[in-house]
Image (cartoon, rainbow, N blue to C red):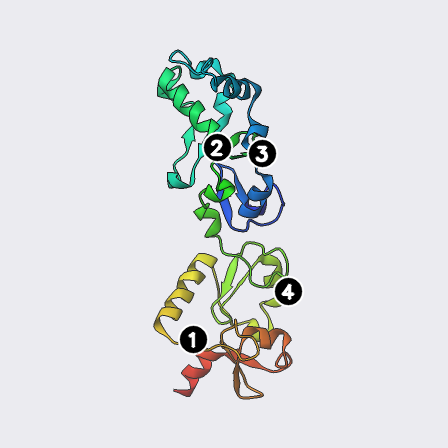
Amino acid sequence: MEDELRCPVCCRVYTKPVLMPCSHSLCVACALSCQEPAQNLLPHSLSSAGSESDSGTVISDRTSLLDFPDMDKLSIVSETDSGVVCNSRPSSYIGTASVANIFLQSLQNCTYGIKCVVCERMVFMDDTGALSLPTNRVLEAILKCERCLIDHRPATAMCEQCEVFFCDICREQCHPATGMYAKHTLVDPTQGDIILKYKKKNSKEFKCNEHPSESLGMFCLSCRLPVCCQCAQDGRHMTHEVQPLSSMCKSQK
């Protein structure tokens, strides 16, 4: 599963994934690095057609998509398409002269192109380049581990008390099911995301002074202070006894 979440160019977990017409995805930065001038990627049959068409000798009323066997490897994407991709060989129009003319003329107006590193199909784009490719919403929605230091792996669990997403490796290293974490509740990442959104919507969230991005979800019994999960794991409270703040609030009622 994790291999499917890695970009085929950088081999890292996707960052801002964009979707190619061939259904493969790239990080947007990788897509930008892979794009080339469109003329560099045109198959010979099409590049020669493009040069000859300037004089009107190739693209004519009798030009057909069947005249260019490489055409079925191409797609055109534009920023104004709203994610609609113009494939080179629609099944119901194969051999139609007007379709061939329209596609070839559109191809000549493209500025950049990308050759897919997986299937070698090519997509041609306007002057916005890879930025015109649609975002892969499915990959973007996958929740990432918040404890990975470099390559953030997909999360496999979320702790309700710590309010932190963990991958399998970080969960074993940072959140073992023993000691102070023995009574913590781990839930599926999707369920955890719903829980966090509900909490954020229905209550004011207090942040840790030492770690501004962390919520105060724990209570240090030694210092009698609310602390965040990071304070409890590697801060000055790491040797102290801590409990989930929610359970402490209930016990005081």
Q: Name the image quarter holding the C terminus.
A: bottom left
- Which of the marked residues, 1 or 3, is nearer the chain's N terminus? 3
Query: Mark 2 is on which residue type?
Result: Cys
Q: Image quarter for residue 222?
A: bottom right
Look at the numbered discs 4 and 2 and tell me whether their residues touch, using CB distance below 8 Å.
no
- The residue carrying pointer 3 sits among few (fewer than 14), some (14 to 19) or many (20 or more) residues within 10 Å by Cα, namely few
Look at the numbered discs 3 and 2 and tell me whether their residues touch, using CB distance below 8 Å.
no
Residue 118 numbered mark, or none: 3
Assign a secondary structure to mark 2: loop
Mark 4 to mark 1 CA distance (whole Å):
27 Å
Foreground disc of the pair 3, 2:
2
Residue 205 numbered mark, or none: 1
Q: Residue furthest front?
A: 55
Name the residue tied to disc 2: 110
User: Residue 158 at x, y = what percent?
Assistant: 50, 63
- Which of the marked residues, 4 or 2, is nearer the chain's N terminus? 2
Mark 4 to mark 3 CA distance (whole Å):
35 Å
Q: Residue furthest top?
A: 62
Assign a secondary structure to mark 3: loop
Q: Image quarter for residue 180?
A: bottom right
In front here: 73 or 36?
36
Foreground disc of the pair 4, 2:
2
Query: Mark 4 is on which residue type?
Result: Gln
- The residue carrying pointer 4 sits among few (fewer than 14), some (14 to 19) or many (20 or more) residues within 10 Å by Cα, namely few
User: Residue 251 at x, y = what percent?
Assistant: 43, 84
Assign a secondary structure to mark 4: helix
Query: Residue at left 54%, top 80%?
Result: 209
Residue 173 numbered mark, or none: 4
Mark 4 to mark 2 CA distance (whole Å):
50 Å
